[in-house]
Image (cartoon, coloured by chain):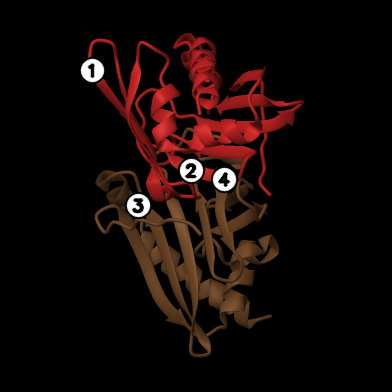
Chain colours: A brown, B red
């Protein structure tokens, strides 16, 4: 049992129903070999993913821009509810250690619920303040996370 | 199961064996009515404590200086292992939301193990960088957490 306190003034939410089963969405979100295939919206790519799927475990990725520049991200897994919910944050690093963040930190809540034969998918990005939320929105949260979800669905269907 | 990665260059550790049973140390650390009696080293006091003892739950306190100034602190519970381990952070607020922190953030790991009839007590404060560790040390981490532990033992024995 965990607590969530959403706040529309601080959160960004992508909610969509997709036509793949919840278990496949969960697998795509929690298997590093699959994550690298969908996590970065093309033409960006994900070159590395390390995920230790337990509270305090690392969630590290490296994304590569079309120009070939690499951007490492480190984060910490907070909640693992098999098949239904994954929570992680960029505000802490592996082992729950605080980490200095350039720009803004966010905590992501990935919620996966059955919807007919498909999945109701809700990704919530929680921020410390409205200005961080705005920066994340201006960076293209909805387009980026939406395109990544399209890619996730492709990957899930290709299995 | 959770992960901890201690790092002596980034962590501060108070380790001591005290002559009260682990279950009483745990109760003193997890019961708001007891926390207010020991949490702030005298002559400081703790005027308020809210603790929702589950991952994502709030851990909020207000401390009052001898001059009567009040200092609110908000934090987030990360791990609750009944009777043996409590992990919380000031880097996230309630519900795992990132929060802006004045000064430095820290994650505290309170470890409680049986040692004869008493308790081996280990409090670890994890920081993002050596400069945060130094600030916390300079603020009097060892003296402050040590004096608070003396008070905790008093409270535990008075029950």
Q: Are marks 2 and 3 on the same chain?
A: no
Q: Residues within 10 Å of mark 1 (few under 14, many from 20)?
A: few
Q: Position of residue B60 (x, y in %)?
A: 36, 36
The image shows residue B85 at horizontal and vertical percentages of 62, 38
**Label located before the other in sequence (2 or 1):** 1
Q: Nearer the viewer, residue B55 or A112?
A: B55
Q: As rendered, which of A60 and B91 lies closer to the eye?
A: B91
Q: Position of residue B100 (x, y in %)?
A: 35, 35
Whether discs 1 and 4 lie on one chain: the answer is: yes
Of circles 4 and 3, which is in front? 4
Position of residue A93 relative to residue B130, above or below, is: below
Find numbered disc 1 in the image and state the secondary structure of the residue it sits on: loop
**Which residue is nearer to you in this view: B114 or A115?**
B114
Circle 4 SS class: strand
Residue that numbered label 4 is attached to: B80
Q: Which mark is residue B85?
A: none
| Contact? badges 1 and 4 (CB < 8 Å) | no
- Calculate the distance from the C-alpha at mark 1 to the C-alpha at mark 4: 31 Å
Q: Chain of mark 2?
A: B
**What number is the disc on residue B69?**
1
Q: Is residue B97 visible?
A: no
**Residue under numbered circle 3:** A136
Residue at 67% across, 34% down = B5
- Image marks 4 and 2: residues in contact by CB distance under 8 Å: yes
Q: Which mark is residue B77?
A: 2
Q: Chain of mark 1?
A: B
- Label 3, label 1: how many angstroms apart (C-alpha)? 36 Å
A88 over A36 or under it: above or below: above
As measured in the structure, the alpha-carbon distance from the residue carrying label 2 to the one carrying label 1 is: 26 Å
Q: CA distance from mark 4 to mark 2?
A: 8 Å
């Amino acid at each position: 049992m965990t607590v969530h306190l959403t706040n529309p003034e601080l959160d960004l939410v992508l909610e969509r129903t997709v036509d793949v089963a919840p278990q496949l969405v969960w697998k795509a979100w929690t298997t590093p070999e699959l994550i690298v295939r969908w996590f970065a919206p093309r033409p960006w790519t994900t070159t590395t993913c390390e995920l230790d799927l337990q509270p305090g475990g690392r969630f590290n990725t490296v994304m590569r821009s079309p120009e070939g520049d690499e951007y490492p991200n480190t984060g910490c897994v907070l909640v693992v509810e098999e098949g239904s919910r994954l929570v992680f944050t960029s505000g802490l690093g592996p082992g729950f250690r605080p980490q200095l963040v350039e720009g803004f930190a966010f905590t992501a809540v990935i919620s996966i619920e059955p919807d007919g034969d498909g999945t109701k998918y809700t990704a919530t990005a929680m921020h410390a303040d409205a200005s961080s939320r705005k920066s994340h929105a201006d960076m293209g949260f909805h387009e980026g996370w939406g395109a990544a979800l399209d890619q996730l669905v492709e990957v899930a269907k290709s299995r």
